[in-house]
Amino acid sequence: MNMPLAHLTWRRRPFTLVEVVLSGVITAGGLAAAVSLVSFNLWTANFAEMRMLASEIAKNRLEQVRLLGFSDLPKLAESSVQVNAQGLPDASGQYHRTTTLVGPDANSCYWVTVTVMAPGGQGHPPAVVNLSTMVLDKDQVVMGG
């Protein structure tokens, strides 16, 4: 028995308006979640980079402290100096560096703290890095005895 070709094809009914709207809502929700996730990941990567650079700026400042003579340490005290990613003073820098010195005390030592603040961006709090060290006057330290 031969059937005409027209009878063998599937007859498809068109989508209803409810099906179209529902599939659009589901697709839009999935796309919004994906865009939100990508945006959060980009912000997280940027924040981690800013925090790492702030840490490097603080480490470099402490290295300057170690290289400077004990009597010259007070010259390094600073309050909220705007610096660039290399730690150099720059009016358009994104980072703020503060170097505080406490001392010298009776043991001829300074406590030096370097605080670097990087912008958080997009309504997030800034990244703050604090590094401290103690600097002794090598001429006053008695070893052994």
Image (cartoon, grey):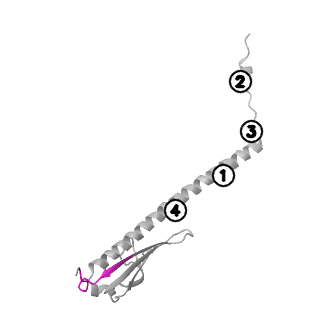
Q: Which residues, given as a range, are shown in magenta? A: 132-143
Q: Nearer the viewer, mark 2 or mark 4?
A: 4
Of badges 1 and 2, nearer the viewer stands 1
Amino acid carrying label 1: it is Gly
- Quarter of the view holding residue 23: top right
**Relative to 90, does residue 33 appear above or below in the rendering?**
above
- What secondary structure is found at the residue carrying circle 2? loop
SS under mark 3: loop
Separation of marks 1 and 2 at Cα, in angstroms: 35 Å
Residue position for label 1: 29
Real-space Cα separation, disc 4 to disc 1, in angstroms: 21 Å
Q: Residue at x 70, y 49 (%)?
A: 25
Which mark, residue 96?
none
The CA distance from mark 1 to mark 3 is: 20 Å
Asked if residue 111 is among those painted magenta in the image, a careful observer would answer no
> x, y (%) of residue 37?
57, 55
Q: Position of residue 76 (x, y in %)?
A: 34, 84
The residue sitting at 54% across, 71% down in the picture is 125
Question: Marks 4 and 3: in contact by CB < 8 Å?
Answer: no
Residue furthest top as drawn: 1
Q: Are marks 4 and 1 in contact (CB under 8 Å)?
A: no
Q: Which residue is mark 4?
A: 43
Residue at numbered disc 2: 9
**Circle 4: element type:** helix
